[in-house]
Each structure stands twice: as structure tokens, then as C-alpha cells.
Image (cartoon, rainbow, N blue to C red):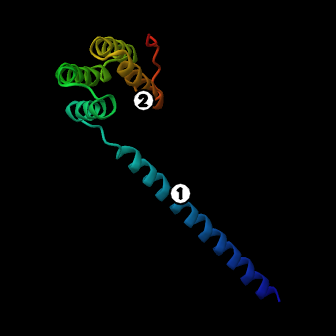
Amino acid sequence: MINQNASLKGSSITINYLLSASFRYCSIIIFLFCSLTTWAQPRYSPEVRSKKEIQWLKDSLQINDAQLNKISAISLSYQQDMDKAANQPDKKKRQAKLMKKMDAEMKTILDHGQYIRYYNREELIRKQDARVYKGHQPM
């Protein structure tokens, strides 16, 4: 009878050890997977981001060719400046300043209705990106 209790006690230790070891391995695998998915987020080039923005403007705001030409140059310059600002110690302040400048330039190019739709979209994107943006409100 003593031998049976000893063998049962030994098997429960083995099961507990295996469970804890498999838990550790699973935890490590999950951690590594989460780390890799975080690193896998793409960072598009300024040219690609500018093209995507212009495509949205064409599709959603029905901008004309004159507006398109003006916006194309401004958008690319803005995206390049945002990348430069991202590498500076005071990046949030610089990026907020660039956003205000872009909004002001867009306001001169777009009509009132287009600008309202543009600004609402930009505000939504800025909130989703968790950026603190204290810009002007559209008039």
C-alpha cells in the first residue's frame, strides 16, 4: 500500500511538471508571435501615402484637375516633412505644426463643403492614430 501511494505521488508531480513546462512554452510562443506581429506593421513611403490620400480626395471629394495639381505637390511635400519630423526629439510639436499648415493650405484649395469632409476625415485619422491634435475647427 505504501508503494502505491508513492507511485501516485510521483505521477502527480510529473503531471504538474509537464503542465507547467507546457504552459511556459506556450507563453513564450504567444509572446514571440505577438512581438512579430507588432514589428510586421508596414510603414509606407511618403509617395505611397500621398497617392492614397490623393485617391481618396478624388473619389470622395470629386476634386477637379486644377485642385488635383495643387494638392499633389502639397501632399507629397507634407508626407516627406512628416517623415523628417518623426525623427526629431520634439516630433509631436513639429507634426502638429505641419498638420495645421496642411489644413490651412487645403482650405485655400478646396471649396467649403469639400474642406469640411476633408477636415472631418483628417480629424478621425488623427484620433485613431492617438495623436494629440489641437488644430483649428473648420469654419
Label 2 – label 1 distance at C-alpha: 34 Å
Residue at 68% across, 72% down: 13
Mark 1 closeness class: few <14, some 14–19, many ≥20 residues within 10 Å: few
Q: Which label number is shown at residue 27?
A: 1
Q: Residue furthest bottom?
A: 1
Q: Where's residue 89, x and y in %? A: 35, 17
Q: Where's residue 77, x and y in %? A: 21, 20
Helix, strand or loop at mark 1: helix
The amino acid type found where label 1 is placed reads: Ser
For the N terminus, the image quarter is bottom right
* 4 with respect to 59 (left or right): right
Helix, strand or loop at mark 2: helix
Q: Where's residue 54, x and y in %? A: 25, 30
**Residue tagged 2:** 125
Front residue of 32/135: it is 135
26 shown above or below 116: below
38 shown above or below 104: below
Q: Where's residue 67, x and y in %? A: 22, 20
The amino acid type found where label 2 is placed reads: Ile
Earlier sequence position, callout 2 versus callout 1: 1
**Image quarter of residue 108:** top left
